[in-house]
Amino acid sequence: MTEIHWDEQLDARGLNCPLPLLKAKQALHKLKPGKILKVVATDAGSQRDFKAFVDQSDHQMLESFSNDDQYTYIIQRG
């Protein structure tokens, strides 16, 4: 498996819905198309939120995984 390198990282740990997604949207907006954002969150609802967001946008979820109570999303800006 190839390691994905990201251009920006957002630490949304400790934030509750909808803040992780809102902050990720703001961070993605600042990136140029094709750049990659890594988001780390602790809100379990973020799994549903990020999937729905990416499905309805031109962004691409390159990877998403969870370790214990931490959720990581690697998103490429569309």
Image (cartoon, helix red, strand yellow):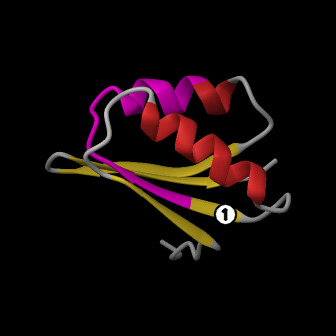
Residue lying farthest left?
A: 68
Indicate the quadrant where residue 11 lies. Answer: bottom left
The residue depicted at 51 percent of the width and 33 percent of the height is: 50
Q: Residues within 10 Å of mark 1 (few under 14, many from 20)?
A: many
Amino acid carrying label 1: it is Ile
- x%, y% of residue 38? 52, 61
Q: How many marks?
A: 1
- x%, y% of residue 16? 31, 32
Residue at image mark 1: 36
- Residue 65 vertical placement versus 22 (above, below): below
Residue 19 horizontal side relative to residue 8, left or right:
left
| Helix, strand or loop status at disc 1 | strand
- x%, y% of residue 21? 51, 36
The residue depicted at 53 percent of the width and 30 percent of the height is: 51
- Residue 24 vertical placement versus 38 (above, below): above
- x%, y% of residue 37? 60, 60
Magenta-span inclusion, residue 50: yes
Residue 78 horizontal side relative to residue 37, left or right:
right
The residue depicted at 64 percent of the width and 33 percent of the height is: 54
- Residue 31 vertical placement versus 25 (above, below): below
Front-most of 33 and 62? Answer: 33
Residue stretch in magenta = 38-52
Front-most of 35 and 26? Answer: 26
Residue 64 horizontal side relative to residue 53, left or right:
left
- Residue 58 vertical placement versus 65 (above, below): above
Magenta-span inclusion, residue 60: no
